[in-house]
Amino acid sequence: MAIRILLIEDDRELGRALRSTLTTEGHAVTTAASLSEAQALMANQAAWQPFDLFLLDLGLPDGEGQEFLHLARKSSTAPVIIISARPQEESKIELLDAGADDYLVKPFSVGELLARIRVALRHRGNHAQPATLHYQRDGLQVDLVKRQIVLNGDDVKLTPTEYELLARLVRSAGQAVSHRQLLMDVWGPEYLEHTQYTRLYVGQLRGKLEKNPADPHFILTETGVGYRMLAAE
């Protein structure tokens, strides 16, 4: 199952880059660009699925990241990694004493960030299975690293939203993914009630991938829950 990460970062360009990197690694990433947005996501997480890890910037447009750290420590045992341009030792000590699991000073390498995430999860006893990045079954091949989909030897062209939906299902291949999880991860928290989106786009995916879309072989419906990508071979 994919590790669910809440990335709280107001630098849009850095946020997009980190989200892309973490998604390629198989993590399910939700982003927030402000303290209030992060707090709202935290408050709503029980309605769908808790986060497994937080990446937290300090200088947010509507407050200090430390406020979110206090909230996280009251309601979650998930690790919190601070990502900040502030190198002062006293700031690091204060935040680590307040409950942060690690403190990474910008700029940092992708490799170091990924290593810190692995260590933080390991220290918290998170034994989640790694997400599927390469999928192959009955002529369908999905490579999430290369962003390539091949069906019976032919490349399959998907829209960006179709691709993100398929990628989310592939990362949890063999497991049911709820409508709310799909809406959160593909469209964002403001779309949690729009379940027609998942039905519409799953229908489009089936039209491109299934021999008989009315009797799907790859993307199965889990009645009352959501959808499940048949496990890879």
Image (tube, rainbow, N blue to C red):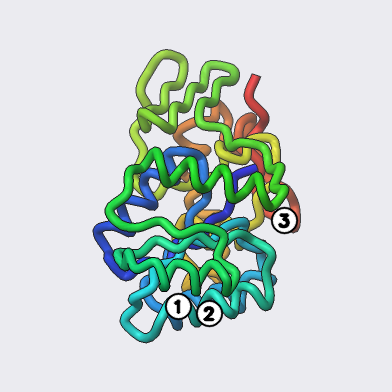
Residue 104 visible: yes
* Foreground label between 2 and 3: 2
Point 35% across, 64% down: residue: 84
Q: Earlier in the sequence, mark 1 or mark 3?
A: 1
Q: CA distance from mark 1 to mark 2?
A: 5 Å
Which numbered tag is attached to residue 225? 3
Q: Earlier in the sequence, mark 2 or mark 3?
A: 2
Residue 167 visible: no
- Is 185 displayed left or right of 128 in the figure? left
Name which residue type carries label 3. Answer: Val
The residue pinned by badge 2 equals 40
The image shows residue 145 at horizontal and vertical percentages of 40, 31
The image shows residue 44 at horizontal and vertical percentages of 61, 75
Residue in the foreground of this view, choosing between 99 and 197? 99
The residue pinned by badge 1 equals 37
The image shows residue 201 at horizontal and vertical percentages of 48, 50
Against 78, residue 150 (above or below) is above
